[in-house]
Image (cartoon, grey):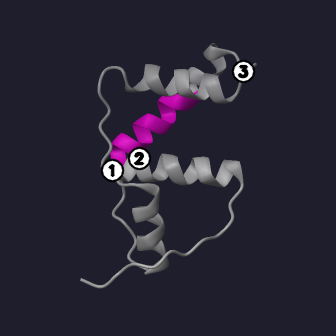
Amino acid sequence: MSKLSRIEFTATPEERKRLDIEAAAHGMSRQQLIRERVLLQTPEPPKFKADKGAIDRAVQAVTRQHVGLPQHVLEPIVCNVICALAADN
């Protein structure tokens, strides 16, 4: 097995967080996600499961990210997104 060498690059905190979220969605580390992208081996889209609590968890996550938006405004938007994702699967 060949020895891996380290490559560094800079990213904003927002970019790093986005990479972490994407990597978690694909079930891999941020390092693995970046390596696959650099080598042009795009990971398959994450599997989406819309269980009973998916909408509630999504609304809570969006509410944490966007403080000040009323939950009753977010719920129909999140519901439409989840329904569209479920229809694509």
**Among the two numbered marks 3 and 1 on one chain, the one whose residue lies closer to the N terminus:** 1
Mark 2 neighbour density, 10 Å: few (under 14) some (14–19) many (20 or more): some
Residue 75 pos. (x, y %): 55, 21
**Amino acid carrying mark 3 in the image:** Leu
Look at 68% across and 48% down and name the residue there: 14
Labels 3 and 2: the sequence-earlier one: 2
Q: Secondary structure at mark 1?
A: loop
Local SS, label 2: helix
Q: Residue visible at 40% across and 55% down?
A: 29
Label disc, if present, on residue 69 of the rendered structure? 3
Name the amino acid type tagged 2: Ala
Q: Is residue 46 left or right of residue 14?
A: left
Query: What's the mark number on residue 24?
Result: 2
Q: Which residue is mark 1?
A: 27
Instruction: Say if the magenta span includes residue 83.
Output: yes
Q: What kind of element bears circle 3?
A: loop
Disc 3 to disc 1, how far (Cα)?
30 Å
Of badges 3 and 2, nearer the viewer stands: 2
